[in-house]
Image (cartoon, rainbow, N blue to C red):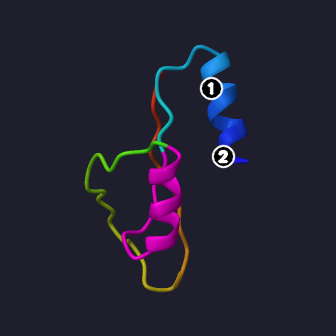
Amino acid sequence: MLRWAIEEARQGGYALVQLTTDKKRADAIRLYERLGFNASREGMKLLLTTSCTGCYHDLSWSLT
């Protein structure tokens, strides 16, 4: 599925494919590296509540 998404982006003229993962997911990181991804930055997040254990809300956006 990732290869398909990368190829769709390439065919669509996009210049960048970006993803996020947890540093603890070593198997996932190895997979992404095999697909050509490079680690590029540290992520930052601010937890606003303790009542949502395991919740993840991506508030980021980008323009390509």
User: Crowding near pointer 2: few (<14 within 10 Å), some, many (20+)?
Assistant: few
Q: Residue at x 62, y 26 (%)?
A: 9
Q: Name the spot of residue 6 as percent of width and height, x first.
A: 62, 34
Give the CA separation, mark 2 to mark 1.
Answer: 11 Å
Q: Quadrant of residue 11?
A: top right
Q: Secondary structure at mark 2?
A: helix
Mark 2 highlights which residue? 2
Q: Residues within 10 Å of mark 1 (few under 14, many from 20)?
A: some
Q: Which residue appears farthest toward the top when viewing the image?
A: 13
Q: Is residue 10 above or below residue 55?
A: above
Residue at x 52%, y 85% (from the top left corner): 53
Q: Could you tell me residue 30's position as x and y percent? A: 46, 62
Q: Measuring from the top left, give residue 51's x and y in whole percent.
A: 50, 86
Secondary structure at badge 1 equals helix
Q: Residue at x 43, y 44 (%)?
A: 37
- Give the label on residue 9, or none: 1
Q: Position of residue 59 (x, y in %)?
A: 47, 50
**With respect to residue 2, does 31 lie above or below?**
below
> Residue type at mark 2?
Leu
Dot 2 or dot 1, earlier in sequence: 2
Residue 58 at least partly seen: no
Residue 1 in sight: yes
